[in-house]
Image (cartoon, helix red, strand yellow):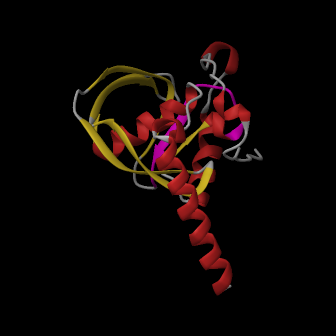
Amino acid sequence: MNLQLLEEHNPQLLEVSEEWDFRIDGSPEELVRAMSKFMSDTGGVGLAAPQLGIKKRIFIMGNFTKLVACINPKIVSLSEERENDLEGCLSFPDLFMKVKRPASCVVQYNTASGELVERELTGLESRVFLHEYDHLIGVTFDQRVGNLSFKMAKDKRKKELKKLSRKA
């Protein structure tokens, strides 16, 4: 499976994804394996199918020790408490911004085998879930920050890339 990442200016990133239908679409396991390899090769902690041009409600999150595939995820509840923390996105290479998100959430999703799971997530796991979930509803993380924060992050990225090109 040859996967290609859509980058920040691609309008497909702003499209809403369709449910994965286990009866029609079959097992998502091959896609999950390919996405897992892609994510580990690119150093991510989360990857949504829409980032690869696949308009299905699937994302993966985690690392080598614990990888979670979320098929047709739903948010059951969000905590009132909000945390502002640094995020990056594979579709926005080398861009990092502080994004305010709920500190915890209760979620439901199907595993790759179709089992329904409900969990409470906190910390980084909650943040990654909510970031990847946004991709399924056509929201990118730059839409979660103000225009000035986005401009400053892009300016910082530009300076960092200039520094790196001088060293090369």
> Do we see residue 119 in this rendering?
no
The extreme front residue here reads 148
Residue 29's x, y, as percent? 60, 35
Q: Which residue does the image show at 35% across and 42% down from the upper left?
A: 125
Q: Is residue 153 above or below residue 29?
A: below
Q: Is residue 131 above or below residue 154?
A: above
Q: Which residue does the image show at 63% across and 18% down from the upper left?
A: 18
The extreme bottom residue here reads 167
| The C terminus sits in image quarter | bottom right
Q: Which residues are magenta?
A: 52-63
Whether residue 1 is in magenta: the answer is no
**Nearer to the camera, 57 or 143:** 143
The extreme top residue here reads 23
| The N terminus sits in image quarter | top right
Determine whether, in the image, residue 88 is placed left or right of residue 57: left
Residue 126's x, y, as percent? 34, 38
Q: Which residue does the image show at 46% across and 36% down from the upper left?
A: 144
Determine whether, in the image, residue 52 is placed left or right of residue 73: right
Whether residue 55 is in magenta: the answer is yes
* Quarter assignment of residue 54: top right
